[in-house]
Image (cartoon, rainbow, N blue to C red):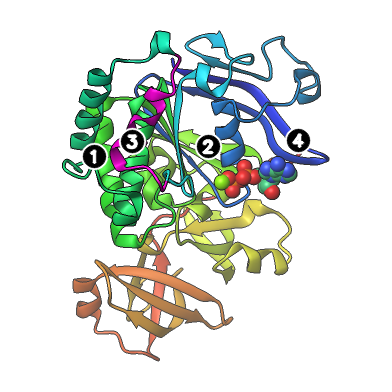
Amino acid sequence: MSVEVRSVSKTYGNFTALRDIHLKIETGELVALLGPSGSGKTTLLRIIAGMDTPDAPSTATANADETDGSIRFFGEDVAKMSVGQRRVGFVFQHYALFKHMTVFDNIAFGLRVRPRSSRPSKSEITDRVHRLLKLIQLEGFGQRFPMQLSGGQRQRVALARALAIEPRILLLDEPFGALDAKVRQSLREWLRRLHEEMHTTTVLVTHDQEEALEVADRVVVMNQAKIEQVGSPAEVFHHPASEFVIDFLGNVNVFHGRIAGGNFQPGPLSTNSSQLQSAGTSSSANKIYVRPHEMKIARMKEDADAIEATVERINRAGVNAKIHLQTKQNDQVRVDLPLDQLDALALEIGERVYFKPIQARVFAPDYTI
Ligand code: ADP
Ligand code: MG
């Protein structure tokens, strides 16, 4: 195992940025830290890198173990090691390249600043930079300056610079955050291919669920200073552990009601959690979560428990059409249907339809401290 985070907490004054985090990262895996802004992702990454220190263990937990509050690299406590000694490579969204240096010099930088005893020879550095330029598909770009590159190319150079020191762990904090959607998508695929080749243990911070689900071997979902769930992309997507996770991973309809004897008995509906709170629900146990593609629509009331609604809007852009329905209680419901099914139904705006969840999820109430 490469990295072990043992009961790490971090407070700034009386604000808790991380609360009792436990995490193990296996050698060679690519782990994504996924969560909304402010959930503590960067703080955790900085603590792993050694740019910030965790709280002392005594304040972390009541029954503290002596290893609580520690970070281990390959079993070794790194508390006293600097960023350089930990041999981490990092790329940040705004971790700009050195503007006055060529691409070649940027990539070589981390090797040239090493003490003479561990510095590779000039020809070794040249060889390594050329190998890295090839890896990031920028052969022949070595003599350019950063301003002569596109945003995506610059981030690839930043990654090569981080890889040049042969880091034990690569830490990426929203590295593609400032790029447009198309470039992000291609860099995401490129990063995954690069990882297959290099197998450098990597932690990728992102608030973009698609990025995390597509690139990572495992996803760590964070919310308000805590880890909500750790699992493979398929696990967190198909078996979300909490209301927060299903809500964060994409669009979901929220119904108030009960599942009794296998039948769905809906109450009033709501489509987002903020509305739910204002609706004053008694407990979260009676919230039922249904993803838009886990619904069916019929023109006639074929099932006794199907719910009547009016078609408000149809958006055909995409693999699935997004159909917005409105119930008699004025609640909004979204149903995603393959285009051929939509065409077979021949729905028109304003028409009355009946919808029914095919698969519904309920969660135990969130544990709050
Ligand atoms: P994320 O990367 O998930 O967006 P961060 O780890 O950057 O979140 O921040 C988590 C929380 O900790 C935020 O509310 C942020 O304002 C707070 N925070 C981070 N660094 C500091 C600091 N140096 N001083 C005070 N608060 C901080
Ligand atoms: Mg951040």
Disc sitting over residue 105 in the figure: 3
Asked if residue 137 lies left or right of residue 83, the reply is left
Q: Amino acid at mark 4?
A: Thr
Q: Earlier in the sequence, mark 2 or mark 3?
A: 3
Q: Nearer the viewer, mark 2 or mark 1?
A: 1
What is the CA distance from the residue labelled 1 to the residue labelled 3? 15 Å
Asked if residue 242 lies left or right of residue 68, the reply is left
Mark 3, other Cα within 10 Å: few <14 / some 14–19 / many ≥20: many
Q: Residue at x 29, y 69 (%)?
A: 337
Mark 2, other Cα within 10 Å: few <14 / some 14–19 / many ≥20: many
Disc sitting over residue 136 in the figure: 1
Q: Nearer the viewer, residue 266 or 79?
A: 79
Q: Earlier in the sequence, mark 2 or mark 1?
A: 1
In the rendered structure, which segment of residues is drawn in magenta? Answer: 99-115
Asked where in the image residue 349 lies, by quadrant, the reply is bottom left
Q: Nearer the viewer, mark 4 or mark 1?
A: 1
Residue at the spot of label 4: 11
Q: Nearer the viewer, mark 4 or mark 2?
A: 4
Mark 4, other Cα within 10 Å: few <14 / some 14–19 / many ≥20: some
Q: Nearer the viewer, residue 245 or 7?
A: 7
Q: Nearer the viewer, mark 2 or mark 3?
A: 3
The answer to whether the residue labelled 2 contacts the one labelled 1, judged by CB atoms less than 8 Å apart, is no
- Give how far across and how far down residue 311 sits, in percent: 40, 84
What is the CA distance from the residue labelled 3 to the residue labelled 4? 38 Å
